[in-house]
Amino acid sequence: MRILGFTETSLVDWDGRISSVIFVGGCNYSCPFCHNYAVADDDPALPEKPWAEIAAVLEQKREWLDGVCITGGEPMIHPEIFSLCRSIKRLGMPVKIDTNAAFPYPLKRLLELDLCDAVAVDIKAPLNERYSTAAGKTVRLAPLRRTIRLLQESDVDCEFRSTLVPGLINPDDIADIGKAVEGAEVFALQQYSPDQARAEAYREKTSYTLSEAEAMAELLRPFVKEVKLRGRFR
């Protein structure tokens, strides 16, 4: 497992908290709309960030940091995620994991070991045949449903979120997505920024407007306790 990026201070990666962010290379998906695909692909051209340097910063700032987010890529593809979380917890800091939900059993073990305090789950599309298009790989939906159920049955802080990519998530899909996570505490609908997308065709898409995103938020509200809009919608 390679750490390919580190943000010392973030106000946006863990709602209501000041956090540091660790970017882990590698992902099991190849989403055409991904804006961080060099990290997701574990691009050899990206230099590795030594853990010792990160640990020194966390040690120095832990009095006013509220936690550490581990994102990617997909952190849960790596067995080393357990040792990384342990190292952060030894510093006395809470851990948040960003995941695509494809690995319910390692996530369950992290929760059982009290190595994870919060989880953010990316829902790429409605849970149907279109999910494989969104992921750029053939996706088995059963593990995603297991992850959703695991988090709904646990007491861990959890946010579900979707990037509103036209053609992958349309207004008609919102009710289906809502039913898949029904009862969730928080669901964030995120603006799609096409400029840095992996696939050229997705760089040419036009993002939803604020009014369109607000209408989708209304469709989602019957299914979850809180809906947030995230990003600078036009």
Image (tube, rainbow, N blue to C red):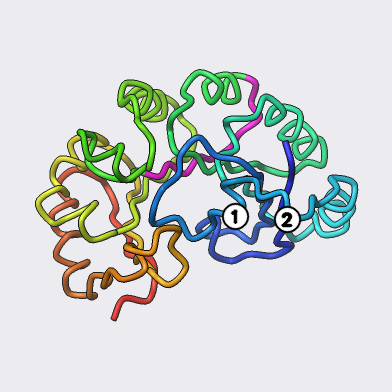
Residue 234 percent location from the top left of the image: 28, 81
Do labels 1 and 2 touch, CB within 8 Å? Answer: yes
The image shows residue 13, relative to residue 177, as above or below, that is below
Where does the image place residue 78, in percent across and percent down from the top left?
A: 64, 29
**Three-letter residue code for mark 2:** Leu
Q: Which residue is mark 2?
A: 46
Tell me which corner region of the image, top left, top right, bottom left or bottom right, holds residue 33.
bottom left
- Is 16 covered by the magenta stretch? no
Above or below: residue 155 compared with residue 109: below
Q: Quadrant of residue 135?
A: top left
Residue at image location 75% in from the left, 36% down from the top: 89
Q: Residue at x 60, y 37 (%)?
A: 75
Residue at image mark 1: 38
Q: Is residue 121 magenta?
A: yes
Circle 2 sits in a helix, a strand or a loop, which is it? loop
Q: Which residues are magenta?
A: 113-122
Q: Is residue 127 left or right of residue 32?
A: left
Toward which corner of the image does residue 117 lie, by quadrant?
Answer: top right
Q: CA distance from mark 1 to mark 2?
A: 8 Å
Give the farthest residue toward the front: 200
Spot occupied by residue 106 in the image (x, y as percentages of width and height): 56, 21
Question: What amino acid is found at the position of numbered circle 1 in the picture?
Answer: Ala
Q: Nearer the viewer, residue 207 or 91?
A: 207
